[in-house]
Image: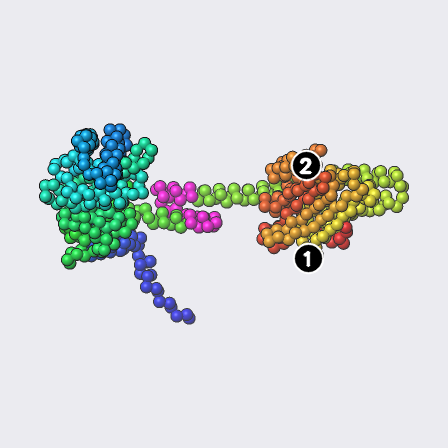
Amino acid sequence: MKAQCKPPWWSFFADLSMERKLFLVFLVIITLPLSFIGLISFKSYSDSIQSNTIAYSEKLIDQMMDGIDGYIEDMKRISSMPAYVQDIRQNLISSNRYYEQKQQMEGDGNVSVAPGDLNLLLSIQRGIESNISFINNIKSGANSVYIFDKYGNGYYSARNGGVRLNLEESYKYWNGHSGDSGGEALLFGTQAYTSNLQSTRYAFAVVRRIMDESWNPIGLIAVEANVSMLKSQVDELDKVTHGQSLIVDEQGKVIYDSAQRQLAANISDSPLFQEAQGRSGSFYDTVNGRERLNIFSASNKTNWKVIISIPVDELTRSVKVTRNATLAATFFIIVLALAVSLFLSFALTKPLTRMIRLMKKVQGGDLDVEFTVQRRDEIGLLGHQFNRMLARIRQLIDDIYRIGEQKKEAELQALQSQINPHFIYNTLESIRMTAELNDDVEAADMISILGKMLRYSTGDVSGGATLRQELTYVGHYVELLNCRYPGRFTLTVDVPPELDNYRLIKLLFQPIIENAAYHGLDDGKPQMHLGISCEMKEQALVFHITDDGCGMDKETLDRLNEALRNESPPKKGLDGGIGLKNVQQRVRVHYGGAYGLEVRSTLGEGTDVCLTLPRPEREREAGVEIEGGPQDERHA
């Protein structure tokens, strides 16, 4: 007696009722994760808050930068006004001419200034400064507009009393950094300067060279804006994010910061700037023992970058309260869901699960299953219909299989019958003419050959033969052709000997040879050379039945191949093809659509009919079993 095996540890669970199994499953799947929520909720919710803050802050930064970019675009448009105001250009030209003459006079030792020159200089100054006053009133926030001639002489009209005292130094800086810019506007970051009110101010500027009609530089315009115009936008951003903002240019020079302690400072070596690489992103750092979330985004127009630093403890301040409320609501919903699920699953899950298992068997191909109907409810009705459906499917499969076998046999017999009358008619005509002309042994030989061919071709239509028998049959047919047309045909067979016993259906090569002889014979050539060769490929055998007859033009060849591909019904016609179409249909019925005929031909040179058949091992895999008659010797 065999020792009784100890049941596995999970057998206890397997033996439980479905209701208890579902209760345990829900208990493990739903309530077990709940026990971990208290441990991970703070971090997960905190991460959610931070990720949402990052996304929202990036959106706010982009909106703020769009406003700043629009303001700078307005400054650039203002800087382009001298290109459209003729009065400014004319006064600059006059100023350049005046100071050019003055330098020449100083070089000649004459330093006296005529009263007319002073009047001219005053007229130039008033003309340019009146235009500057007009420009200052176009855009709010522009501190000052400076226009210089090409000798560095500056003209300006102060707004709010904020005029640079170091104009000469500023001009050299702007002029030196805009040497190759042509008429393009250049943006200069925040610079500190001392105003004529003896106060230190900070401003960024747009500088553009002024060109004359010949595109020669005649001066320089600088439109500067005080960084105070950024304060309202930055303060609004800091209020929403509870952080501090910093605007820097590509070189790490501070444009503006919330505390206004680093204006115009270079922070390119600071860890904060070096960490903020790329167009946008976020990272964490710790300053004075306080962890910060840093979010940054860069403008596509100015390449200025806004960096917001938000203390992490500011983000998680309200997380605990929200977490506790969420846990309470989640626990209540889970308890309610467990109760409802247990009630419904007990009534529905057991029969449905059993039916699902049966359906999976049917999907896998097993139709010999049956659903046991235990109740008369909807599940019982569904199971009854399921059983009826399977019974009907089994009956239909049997009917389709039987009809398919009958159809295949009928097609083979019908296709076979198309060849024999056509072939026998031509052969008997050859025998009649030969007997009438010779009345000797030659006619007897022809009749003997015909007898062999008839015995071969009139056998079981569903049977087959070996490749050796098929080639012997083709050789007999060519002999009969040469009896009718003495010496007009030669046949060359080049097939590997190991294929002699290759099984195939009957009458595949003879209809193709017949088609070549009767439709490809070139009366201008004394002899037609026929050939049969085999090309062994990885996936199939390709037999080439070739002739050197008259061939076909491209239009006829395309029409014939199209008819073969579409498997149009065989019918007699001048273009040949009754044999080819017949062979094509029989090959596809036996071997499948991957095999068949393809014709290649060149007009005046000959034709190559490619017959593709499965390799011997693939023929066995396809389930093609063909029995043939006795083997004959190969004859060519």
Q: Are marks 1 and 2 in contact (CB under 8 Å)?
A: no
Residue at horizontal 68 percent and vertical 34 percent from the top: 571
Q: Amino acid at mark 2?
A: Asp
Residue at mark 1 to residue at mark 2: CA–CA distance: 37 Å
Quarter of the view holding residue 601: top right
Q: Is residue 418 left or right of residue 345?
A: right
Secondary structure at numbered mark 2: loop
Q: Amino acid at mark 1?
A: Glu
**Magenta stretch?**
359-386
**Residue under label 2:** 553
Residue at horizontal 16 percent and vertical 44 percent from the top: 166
Quarter of the view holding residue 187: top left
In terms of depth relative to the viewer, which is nearer, 431 or 527?
527
Q: Is residue 305 magenta?
A: no
Residue at horizontal 26 percent and vertical 30 percent from the top: 90
Secondary structure at numbered mark 1: helix
In terms of depth relative to the viewer, which is nearer, 85 or 375?
85
Q: Is residue 338 visible?
A: no
Residue 613: percent from the left, percent from the top?
A: 63, 49
**Residue under label 1:** 498
Residue 41: percent from the left, percent from the top?
A: 20, 53
In terms of depth relative to the viewer, which is nearer, 610 or 311?
311
Q: Is 569 above or below relative to 477?
A: above
Foreground mark, 1 or 2? 2
In terms of depth relative to the viewer, which is nearer, 287 or 95?
95
Label 2 CA crowd tier, 10 Å (few <14, some 14–19, many 20+) = few
Residue 352: percent from the left, percent from the top?
A: 36, 47
Which numbered disc, 1 or 2, marks the residue that appears first in the sequence? Answer: 1
Query: Which quarter of the figure is the N terminus placed in?
Result: bottom left
The residue at the far front in this view is 109
Q: Is residue 379 visible?
A: yes
